[in-house]
C-alpha cells in the first residue's frame, strides 16, 4: 500500500497536491464567516451533478422539451427530486452569490493584491446569471417561454447590432427548436465550461493570496483541514436542507397532506419544481415574469416606460451596464479610504434598490388587486363621471394586477389539465396539440369569445361565463333532462334563462308550452318526453340514466311522435316537416350541435325563424367563416361535457 | 489548483500578526475529522443519489406486455410454404410519446398445411440483425455475421447461439375472414436461452 502511494506520488504528485489543498493556512483558526466561497462551490457542484443527470433525460426541441421535462417530473423515479434540487439550488446559488459579493466588498477583499480575483468573481457572477437565464427557458412552459422572450426582445434595443444580436441568440427571428438547441448548448456546455475555467483561476488566486482575515483573530492559527472543512460542510448541509425543504414545501404548507404524498404512486405529482402549461406561441401569457431574482430588473424597466426606445435602452442596458462598470471599478476606487466607504455605500444602495424593486414588483402583481379594489368599484358606481388622475392610476394598477392573477390562475388550470392529457401518451406533435384539442380547456375560452355576448352559461358549481346582459338561453347543461324540463315548463320558458329575451318569447313554442293542450299532458308523460328528447343527445353524463330508463324513453318517443303534437312543427324520427322548427332527431347530439352552431338559419334548425344567432360556418371555405370546424366541434363537445377524463386509478 | 507559491506581502504580514499554527487537540481534532468526513460525504453524495435514481429508472420492472396482433390475412401467406416477411403494426410508447399504429418489428410467416401458419421473429439471435430468406438455398441468412437457419428456424451454421425465435401464431376466423394473429415478442440476443425482453 505504502509502495503504491509512493509510486503514485512520484508519478503524479497527488499526495502533495492533496496536502497543499487540505493544509491551507487559516490565520486565527476556522470561522463561520469563511464558509461562503465554499458553499458557492458546493452549489455549483450540485448543479453540475444534477444537471448532467437531467441532461440524460432532456430533449431540446419545440415538440419534446416540455414533454421530456414532464416525463422527468411525473414518470421517472426520483425525477421530481433531481429536478427540484437543480431548480432550487440555482436559486440558492444566486442568493449565496449576493452574500459572497457583499462580504467581499464590506471586508475590502478586493484591494491589492486581490483586484484581479475580484474581477474574476464578477465575471463568474455574470456566468451564473447567464446560466439562470438560459435554464429558465428549457422546460418550454408558458412561464419560461414568455419571460425569456421578453428578455431576448430587449436585446433588440441595443444600438446598431441589436437586431442581429437578437437573431443570433434566438436562432432566427422566431422562437422555436433552434432557440432551444442554442440555449441548451449555452446552458449545459459553454457556460459551465467557462464557469469551471474561471472558477479554477479564482480559487487558485484565492489560495495564492490567502484568506482575507477578519481582525481581531479569535484564536491560534489552524489549517483548512479539519476545522474549516467541518464548518464548510455544515454550511453546505444547511443549504442542502433548505433546498430540500423548498422541494417538499407543498407538503409542509399543508397544500397536500403528508400521507397523501407518501401514499401517492408518484411523489412528483405533488413535490419539486413547478412545471407550467406547455408554451403556446399563439396565445399570450399575461403573467410572464422572470425568475424572482431578476424581478428587480423587470420592475426597474417599468420606470422607463413611456420614454420609448431610448427609455428601454437606458433601463435595460445603459444603467445596468453602468452599475456593472461601477462594480468593476471598485478595486480602483477602493484604494482611497473614502473610496472604500463609497463602495460599501454603493453595495448597500444597490441591495436596497433591489429589495425595494422586487417588493414593488411582487406587490404590483399580487397585492394591487386587493388594495385597489375599492378605487375600481367607486368610479364604476358613478358611471360616466370623469376619473381623477389618481383614480385612473389606481384603475390601471388594479387591471394590471387582475390580469396577472387571472393569467396565473388560468395557467395553473391549464398546466394541471395538460398533465392529465399527457398521461394518455403524447402525440409526436407535442403536448400543445393535446391542449389545443381539449374541449375542457378550449370550450370556455371559445364560448367567452364567441357566444357569451348573448348566451349565458351559469354553472351552479363552477361559476358563470357571460358578458353583459344575457339575451339568449343559458346553455349550461344544454339538452340535459334538467335543461329540457325547464324548456317545457310554462314559467321557465318565458324567463331569461330560455326564451324570455328573444323573439321566440312570442313564438309558437312558448304558445304551445303555456297553452291549454300541453297543460293537460300528465306530469308522468311530460317526464317521459323529457327523458326521450334528452336521450337524443347521448350526453356522456346521462349514459347510465338513459340506459336505466330505456322503457320510459321508448314511451316518451312515442308520445313525441304521435300524441303530444311536437311533429306539427318539428321533424322527429321520420315524422313531421323541416323548416318550421328545429329538428328533434338527434337534438343536442354532437352532430346536431355542430350543425346548429355552423348555421342556425338552415331549415334543419331555426330556418327563417332564427332570431339573432349568427351562422358561424355557413360557407365551405374555412377562411370565410367566423369559426373553423374544429373550434365548433370543441364548443359542441364542451357544451355536451364530452372530453377525456383520466381513470381514477393511476395508469402506472 | 491549490498550489501555494511565494507568500505575498500581505500573507507575510498576516503570518507575523498571528500565532503559529497549533496542532488541534487530540480527541477534539479526531471528532472534528470524523464529523467533517461524514457531513462532507453526505452533501457530496446526495446529488449523485438523486441522479442515479433517475439514471436507473430503466431497470424498474415493468409488466411485460406481449400483445396478440393481427399481422395479415391468411391469403397473403404463400400457399406453397415459402416464408414471407410481414411488418408487425401496433401502438407504440416511446418515453413520453405515444405513436398509434407503428411498425414495431417484423415476422416471417410460413404455411404448414392449409390453415396452419408458423411465425418466426426476423431478428437474428446472435446480434440482432434482420435475417433474410434465400429462395435459392431455402435458408434464412443473416447479413451481419452469416449465420444460417433452416426454413423452420432451426440453427444451421454461423455464430448464432440458437435458432430463430418462434412466436405463438394462430389463424382466426373473424367476420368470415381468416386472419393470422401473432403473439409478438422480442428476445435477448447473444445467449443460448430464449428469454423474452420485458
Image (tube, rainbow, N blue to C red):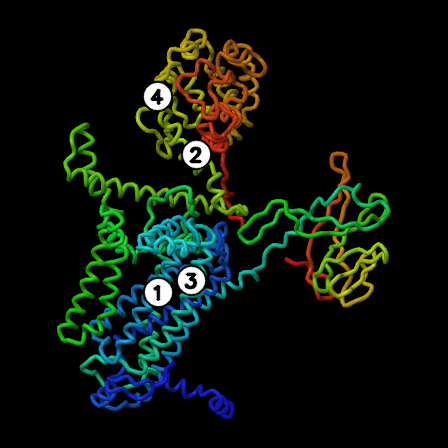
Do labels 3 and 2 touch, CB within 8 Å?
no
Residue B156 in percent (x, y) is at 83, 63
Task: Check residue A384 in the rendering and tell me which mark sits there, or answer none.
Answer: none
Q: Residue B149 appears in which quarter of the rendering? A: bottom right
| Secondary element at tag 4 | loop
Q: Which residue is mark 3?
A: A186
**Residue drawn 45% across the image and 30% down it:** A627
In this rendering, does residue A265 appear at all?
Answer: no
Q: Give the label, 3 or 2, closer to the camera.
A: 3
Marks 3/4 same chain = yes
- Looking at marks 1 and 3 on the same chain, the residue that comes earlier in the sequence is marked by 1
Q: Give the label, 1 or 2, closer to the camera.
A: 1
Q: Is residue A221 left or right of residue A80?
A: left
Reply above or below: A121 against A397.
Answer: below
Do labels 1 and 4 touch, CB within 8 Å?
no
Do labels 1 and 2 touch, CB within 8 Å?
no
Residue A36 in percent (x, y) is at 29, 72
Q: Is residue A388 left or right of residue A569?
A: left
Residue sitting at the far top: A516
Residue A566 in percent (x, y) is at 50, 12
Q: Is residue A604 left or right of residue A504?
A: right
| Secondary element at tag 3 | helix
Task: Check residue A471 in the rendering and tell me which mark sits there, or answer none.
Answer: 4
- Looking at marks 3 and 4 on the same chain, the residue that comes earlier in the sequence is marked by 3
**Host chain of mark 2:** A
Q: CA distance from mark 1 to mark 4?
A: 58 Å
Amino acid at each position: 500500500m505504502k509502495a503504491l502511494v509512493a509510486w503514485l506520488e512520484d508519478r503524479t504528485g497527488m499526495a502533495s497536491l492533496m496536502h497543499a489543498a487540505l493544509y491551507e493556512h487559516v490565520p486565527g483558526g476556522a470561522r463561520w464567516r469563511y464558509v461562503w466561497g465554499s458553499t458557492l462551490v458546493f452549489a455549483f457542484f450540485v448543479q453540475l451533478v444534477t444537471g448532467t443527470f437531467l441532461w440524460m433525460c432532456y430533449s431540446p426541441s419545440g415538440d419534446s422539451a416540455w414533454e421530456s421535462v414532464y416525463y422527468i417530473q411525473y414518470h421517472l423515479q426520483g425525477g421530481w427530486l433531481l429536478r427540484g434540487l437543480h431548480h432550487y439550488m440555482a436559486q440558492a446559488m444566486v442568493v449565496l452569490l449576493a452574500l459572497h459579493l457583499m462580504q467581499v466588498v464590506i471586508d475590502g477583499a478586493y484591494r491589492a493584491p486581490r483586484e484581479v480575483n475580484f474581477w474574476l468573481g464578477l465575471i463568474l457572477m455574470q456566468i451564473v446569471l447567464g446560466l439562470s437565464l438560459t435554464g429558465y427557458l428549457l422546460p418550454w412552459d408558458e412561464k419560461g417561454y414568455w419571460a425569456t422572450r421578453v428578455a431576448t426582445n430587449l436585446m433588440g434595443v441595443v444600438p446598431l447590432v441589436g437586431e442581429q444580436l437578437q437573431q443570433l441568440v434566438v436562432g432566427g427571428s422566431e422562437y422555436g427548436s433552434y432557440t432551444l438547441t442554442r440555449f441548451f448548448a449555452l446552458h449545459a456546455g459553454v457556460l459551465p465550461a467557462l464557469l469551471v475555467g474561471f472558477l479554477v483561476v479564482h480559487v487558485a488566486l484565492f489560495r495564492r493570496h490567502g484568506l482575507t482575515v477578519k481582525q481581531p483573530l479569535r484564536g491560534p492559527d489552524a489549517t483548512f483541514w479539519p476545522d474549516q472543512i467541518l464548518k464548510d460542510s455544515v454550511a453546505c448541509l444547511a443549504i442542502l436542507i433548505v433546498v430540500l425543504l423548498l422541494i417538499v414545501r407543498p407538503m409542509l404548507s399543508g397544500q397536500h397532506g403528508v400521507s397523501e404524498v407518501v401514499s401517492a404512486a408518484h411523489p412528483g405529482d405533488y413535490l419539486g419544481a413547478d412545471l407550467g402549461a406547455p408554451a403556446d406561441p399563439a396565445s399570450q401569457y399575461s403573467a410572464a415574469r422572470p425568475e424572482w431574482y431578476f424581478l428587480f430588473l423587470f420592475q426597474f424597466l417599468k420606470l422607463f416606460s413611456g420614454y420609448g426606445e431610448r427609455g428601454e435602452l437606458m433601463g435595460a442596458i445603459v444603467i445596468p451596464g453602468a452599475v456593472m462598470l461601477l462594480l468593476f471599478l471598485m478595486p480602483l476606487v477602493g484604494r482611497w479610504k473614502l473610496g472604500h466607504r463609497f463602495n460599501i455605500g454603493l453595495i448597500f444602495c444597490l441591495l436596497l434598490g433591489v429589495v425595494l424593486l422586487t417588493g414593488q414588483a411582487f406587490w404590483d402583481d399580487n397585492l394591487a388587486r386587493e388594495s385597489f379594489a375599492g378605487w375600481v368599484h367607486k368610479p364604476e358606481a358613478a358611471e360616466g363621471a370623469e376619473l381623477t388622475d389618481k383614480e385612473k392610476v389606481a384603475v390601471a394598477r388594479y387591471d394590471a394586477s387582475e390580469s396577472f392573477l387571472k393569467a396565473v390562475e388560468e395557467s395553473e388550470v391549464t398546466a394541471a389539465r395538460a398533465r392529465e392529457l399527457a398521461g394518455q401518451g403524447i402525440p409526436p406533435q407535442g403536448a400543445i396539440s393535446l391542449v389545443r384539442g381539449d374541449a375542457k380547456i378550449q370550450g370556455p375560452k371559445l364560448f367567452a369569445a364567441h357566444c357569451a355576448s348573448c348566451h349565458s352559461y351559469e354553472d351552479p358549481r363552477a361559476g358563470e361565463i357571460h358578458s353583459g346582459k344575457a339575451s339568449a338561453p343559458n346553455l349550461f347543461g344544454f339538452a340535459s333532462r334538467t335543461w329540457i324540463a325547464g324548456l317545457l315548463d310554462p314559467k321557465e320558458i318565458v324567463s331569461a334563462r330560455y326564451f324570455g329575451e328573444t323573439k321566440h318569447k312570442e313564438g309558437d313554442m312558448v304558445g304551445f308550452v303555456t297553452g291549454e293542450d300541453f297543460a293537460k299532458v300528465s306530469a308522468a308523460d311530460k317526464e317521459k318526453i323529457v327523458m326521450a328528447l334528452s336521450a337524443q343527445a347521448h350526453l356522456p353524463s346521462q349514459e347510465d340514466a338513459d340506459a336505466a330508463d330505456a322503457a320510459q324513453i321508448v314511451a316518451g318517443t312515442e308520445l313525441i311522435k304521435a300524441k303530444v303534437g311536437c311533429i306539427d312543427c318539428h321533424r322527429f324520427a321520420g315524422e313531421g316537416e323541416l323548416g318550421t322548427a328545429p329538428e328533434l332527431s338527434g337534438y343536442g347530439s354532437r352532430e346536431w350541435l355542430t350543425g346548429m352552431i355552423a348555421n342556425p338559419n338552415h331549415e334543419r334548425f331555426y330556418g327563417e325563424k332564427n332570431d339573432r344567432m349568427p351562422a358561424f360556418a355557413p360557407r365551405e371555405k374555412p377562411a370565410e367563416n367566423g369559426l373553423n370546424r374544429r373550434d365548433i366541434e370543441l364548443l359542441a363537445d364542451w357544451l355536451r361535457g364530452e372530453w377525456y377524463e383520466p381513470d381514477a386509478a393511476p395508469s402506472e | 489548483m491549490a498550489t501555494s507559491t511565494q507568500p505575498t506581502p500581505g500573507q507575510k504580514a498576516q503570518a507575523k500578526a498571528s500565532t503559529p499554527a497549533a496542532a488541534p487537540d487530540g480527541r477534539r481534532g479526531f471528532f472534528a475529522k470524523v464529523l467533517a468526513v461524514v457531513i462532507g460525504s453526505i452533501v457530496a453524495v446526495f446529488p449523485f443519489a438523486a441522479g442515479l435514481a433517475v439514471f436507473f429508472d430503466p431497470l424498474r420492472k415493468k409488466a411485460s406486455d406481449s400483445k396478440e396482433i393481427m399481422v395479415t390475412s391468411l391469403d397473403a401467406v404463400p400457399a406453397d410454404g415459402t416464408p414471407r416477411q410481414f411488418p408487425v403494426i401496433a401502438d407504440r410508447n416511446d418515453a413520453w410519446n405515444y405513436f398509434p399504429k407503428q411498425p414495431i418489428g417484423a415476422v416471417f410467416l410460413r404455411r404448414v398445411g392449409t390453415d396452419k401458419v408458423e411465425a418466426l421473429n426476423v431478428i437474428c439471435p446472435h446480434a440482432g440483425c434482420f435475417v433474410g430468406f434465400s429462395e435459392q438455398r431455402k435458408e434464412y441468412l443473416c447479413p451481419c455475421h452469416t449465420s444460417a437457419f433452416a426454413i423452420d428456424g432451426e440453427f444451421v451454421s454461423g455464430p448464432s447461439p440458437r435458432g430463430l425465435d418462434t412466436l405463438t401464431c394462430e389463424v382466426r376466423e373473424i367476420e368470415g375472414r381468416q386472419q393470422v394473429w401473432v403473439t409478438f415478442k422480442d428476445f435477448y440476443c447473444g445467449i443460448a436461452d430464449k428469454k423474452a425482453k420485458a
